[in-house]
């Protein structure tokens, strides 16, 4: 389409000529923003997400949380393309029901993680544009966090941030929870109160600098007593 | 005597000297060319009874990350003229600086105050010559001997003269408020309130605009640059203090080099600490 005057001949205008009809590809994906975060403690897990749903420079909704309750001990946070988030959670719910009816027991967090990996890889060549993080309690009652990429690669972590502000949150978590890049600091185990306060502070910071994160923060705290939720307001601008 | 001009008018037509080099660079960067800092932005201006009110938000974004939370988007042009800029931050900064220098030289040469229409002509001429490559969307407001004027100049060189204007990524949100609230010959307080609400609507509805609101009022009597006019209602609510004690970052070696200095001359200037 471009003639050979791309290189050389400075000052001369490039020749533009009409080459025929140009195909403009329709993109099946769109990015709806949002940040999710999960932290695993000794006997608890926290899954938190902001509630802003955006597209381009506009806001679709200020109250669209990204944490989805799967079982009494597992919550999944999904951010990315909202259409795929909704479909994926519907599919996971259906698979959970099928498992319950076949095996007469609820799926454990580890089993859900393994299943989600196969579901995502099943669409390897037209992926779900979703960044997932599962938070819950494992069979021994300890906190567990599993983080995924859009095509199903996953691993168990102590803490993970995903979504649009993940690059801003992850280093702060590495420092405060993982005690990285610090010397002479006592490695105290993370308490539930300190973890919840850290998550709230971290999202307030993310809302300052990431335009896609804001409006409100939904925190789901998973303990053996059940799942409790808290909502904290964030910047709306 | 020819009027000296800081802006050297180059040879006739468009200047595509860098087109070949840019095309080659694009290939090297593999599609991921560095993105310039854009101001996202909501800017607005309103003509009222005694002059012009300009308003702007204070957020500068660098592809969806907030780079500056207290960016100044209302630029000085002349003692009787100010210009709000949206688009690429470097372009608005340099274009308005160049315009201001040119008008200062004109004033000194001719002994006259610059008129708003002159500033508009210079901007239009420059932006059209660069064929949209300079990404500056400007709202220019000022008061001169012919009256109160508000103009907008687009990046391709288009000009519009209106009693109320808005530009930037949040312009549609602001324009809705201006269309609803504008009346000819508004009082100062009503005009400031209208512009403030327009910018605030842009801040809440547009992701590229945010933080505080700056206002600039220009009248025959002078200029009132209020920065910030309205501070953002969202203050830092973090509970924990994240402080690190000395020794958190290990000190591996320490070397002290004393500098031998001679006192050559001493001058004491008392500071007025009122």
Image (cartoon, rainbow, N blue to C red):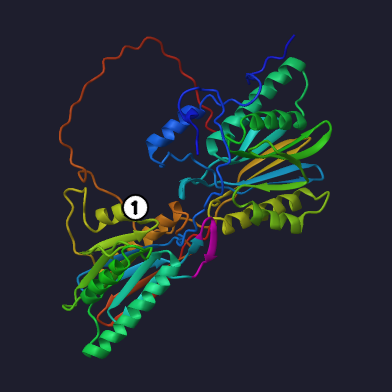
**Apparent side of residue B170 relative to residue B181 in the rendered image (left or right):** left
Q: What residue is rendered at 61% in x and 49% in y?
A: B42
Q: In this orientation, which residue lies closer to the viewer: B233 or B153?
A: B153
Of residues B196 and A93, the one nearer the viewer is: A93
Quadrant for the C terminus of chain B, please. top right
Name of the residue lying farthest toward the front? A20
Give the magenta-colored segment's residue range. A55-63
Q: Give residue B153's quadrant in the image.
A: top right
Q: In which quarter of the image is the N terminus of chain B?
A: top right
The residue indicated by pointer 1 is: A167
The chain letter for the residue carrying disc 1 is A
Between residue B57 and residue B188, name the one nearer to us.
Answer: B57
Q: Where is residue B106 in the image (x, y as percent from the top left)?
A: 72, 20
Neighbor class of circle 1 (other Cα within 10 Å; few <14, some 14-19, many 20+) is few
Please determine whether, in this image, residue A173 is positioned above or below residue A88. above
Please indicate whether residue B173 sits to the left or right of residue A2 in the image: right
Does B112 appear in magenta?
Answer: no
Answer yes or no: is residue B3 visible.
yes
Determine whether B121 is above or below A103 in the image.
Answer: above
Residue A72 percent coordinates (x, y):
29, 82
Picture residue at 49% right of the left edge, 40% below the top: B37
Q: Residue B62 location, x and y as percent?
A: 47, 44
Q: Of helix, strand and loop, which one carries label 1? A: helix
Q: Please indicate whether residue B22 sits to the left or right of residue B114 in the image.
A: left
Which residue: 63% across, 52% down? B199
- Identify which residue is drawn at 25% across, 75% down: A112
């Amino acid at each position: 389409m471009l003639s050979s005057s791309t290189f050389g001949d400075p000052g001369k205008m490039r020749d533009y000529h009409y080459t025929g009809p140009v195909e403009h590809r329709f993109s099946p994906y769109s990015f709806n923003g949002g940040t999710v975060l999960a932290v695993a403690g000794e006997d608890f897990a926290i899954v938190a997400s902001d509630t802003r749903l955006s597209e381009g420079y506009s806001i679709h909704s200020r109250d669209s949380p990204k944490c989805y309750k799967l079982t009494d001990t597992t919550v999944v946070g999904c951010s990315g393309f909202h259409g795929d988030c909704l479909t994926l959670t519907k599919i996971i719910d259906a698979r959970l029901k099928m498992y319950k009816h076949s095996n007469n027991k609820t799926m454990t967090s580890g089993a859900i993680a393994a299943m989600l990996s196969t579901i995502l890889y099943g669409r390897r060549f037209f992926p779900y544009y979703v960044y997932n993080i599962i938070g819950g309690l494992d069979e021994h009652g300890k906190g567990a966090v599993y983080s995924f990429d859009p095509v199903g690669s996953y691993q168990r972590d102590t803490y993970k941030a995903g979504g649009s502000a993940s690059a801003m949150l992850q280093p702060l978590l590495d420092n405060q929870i993982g005690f990285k890049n610090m010397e002479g600091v006592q490695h105290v185990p993370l308490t539930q109160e300190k973890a919840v306060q850290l998550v709230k502070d971290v999202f307030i910071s993310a809302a300052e600098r990431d335009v896609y994160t804001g409006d409100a923060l939904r925190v789901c705290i998973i303990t053996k007593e059940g799942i409790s939720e808290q909502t904290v307001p964030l910047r709306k601008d | 005597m020819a009027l000296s001009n800081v802006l050297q008018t180059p040879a006739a037509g468009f200047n595509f000297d860098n087109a070949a080099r840019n095309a080659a660079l694009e290939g090297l960067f593999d599609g991921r060319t560095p993105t310039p800092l854009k101001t996202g932005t909501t800017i607005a201006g309103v003509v009222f009874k005694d002059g012009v009110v300009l308003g702007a938000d204070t957020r500068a974004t660098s592809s969806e990350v907030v780079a500056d939370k207290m960016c100044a988007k209302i630029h000085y042009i002349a003692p009787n003229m100010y210009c709000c800029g949206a688009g690429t931050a470097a372009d608005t900064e340099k274009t308005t600086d160049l315009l201001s220098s040119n008008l200062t030289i004109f004033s000194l040469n001719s002994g006259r105050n610059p008129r708003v229409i002159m500033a508009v002509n210079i901007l239009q001429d420059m932006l059209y010559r660069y064929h949209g490559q300079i990404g500056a969307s400007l709202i220019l407001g000022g008061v001169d001997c012919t009256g109160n004027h508000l103009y907008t100049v687009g990046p391709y060189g288009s000009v519009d003269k209106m009693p109320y204007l808005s530009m930037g990524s949040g312009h549609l949100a602001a324009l809705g408020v201006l269309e609803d609230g504008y009346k000819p010959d508004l009082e100062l307080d009503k005009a400031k309130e209208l512009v403030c609400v327009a910018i605030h609507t842009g801040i809440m509805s547009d992701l590229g605009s945010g933080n505080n609101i700056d206002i600039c009022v220009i009248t025959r009597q002078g200029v009132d640059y209020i920065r910030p006019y309205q501070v953002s209602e969202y203050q830092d609510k973090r509970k924990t203090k994240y402080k690190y004690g000395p020794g958190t970052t290990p000190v591996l070696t320490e070397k002290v080099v004393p500098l031998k200095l001679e006192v050559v001359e001493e001058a004491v200037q008392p500071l007025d600490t009122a």
